[in-house]
Image (spheres, grey):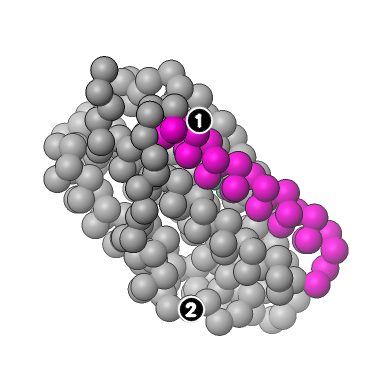
Amino acid sequence: MAVDPRMIHLYSYYRDAELRGATLLLKLIMRIDDSETQVKLAKHLADETRHAWLWTKRIADLGATPIRIVDGYQTRIGQQIGIPKNLVDLFALTVVVEERAQRRYCEHARRPDVDPATREILHEVTKDEKWHIGWIKNKLKEFAAANGGLDKAAATLERYRAIDQQVVADLIAKEREAFGFSFSDDPVAPEYPAPQREEHEV
Ligand SMILES: [Fe+2]
Ligand SMILES: [Fe+2]
């Protein structure tokens, strides 16, 4: 059966997000001194590159090659927030993109029509994202507290989350144009958008 080119595009978007997530972690690992964080960042980085490989393999297994994505989630986010200036910015950005990745993968996985190979990858990556969000959030909090910047960290997170919402709304609109629906739609009530994320804590 011929593969749907739109699915290759979608998996390429996921792959691109993982690769750019890894790039963000590389920026952090080059700037952080403390050894315990070095260990966590190295593990986290290994996970993200593995996720990029899982999507790459999925594409290859379908007999295709990855498409270069120039307008993906992270590129759009980056265009709006500008270059992160300090460690708080980098940690906050990592928190927001990790939360988005986890949420999106969960939304995709709850669809009843997901093929088993894709479902397996969605579960695999979601499992890691939980740990990623937990430790990066704690680190942001700890780092901001030690540097007298808890309020600033909270404001940065709020600003990034607002940008994330807008970027995702644009991407969902684009997805609806291509597929007639979004993989983020609730399959039980497709006429309603997926519920907004609950309250956030820094
Ligand atoms: Fe990931
Ligand atoms: Fe992650």
Residue 11 figure quarter? top left
Q: Quick check: 16 left or right of 22?
A: left
Q: Residue at x 65, y 57 (%)?
A: 136
Q: Which residues are magenta?
A: 33-60
Residue 149 figure quarter? bottom right
Q: Is residue 62 visible?
A: yes
Q: Main secondary structure of the magenta part?
A: helix
Task: Using the image as rendered, state which of residue 176 and residue 9 is in the foreground.
Answer: 9
Q: Residue at x 73, y 54 (%)?
A: 42
User: Which quadrant is the N terminus positioned in?
Assistant: top left
Question: Tag 2: Cα neighbours inside 10 Å, few (<14), some, or many (≥20)?
Answer: few
Q: Residue 56, how many percent across, how many down?
A: 48, 39
Say the numbered circle drawn on residue 121.
Answer: 1
Q: Residue 163, how many percent across, how many down?
A: 36, 66
Question: Tag 1: Cα neighbours inside 10 Å, few (<14), some, or many (≥20)?
Answer: some
At label 1, the amino acid type is Ile
Task: Establish if 10 lies above or below 164.
Answer: above
Q: Residue furthest right?
A: 35
Q: Residue 155, how many percent across, how many down?
A: 49, 74
Q: Say whether disc 2 or disc 1 marks the residue closer to the N-terminus.
A: 2
Q: Which residue is mark 2?
A: 83
At label 2, the amino acid type is Ile
Q: Quick check: 143 left or right of 182?
A: right
- Tell whether position 43 is magenta: yes
User: Mark 2 and mark 1: span between their CA atoms?
Assistant: 31 Å
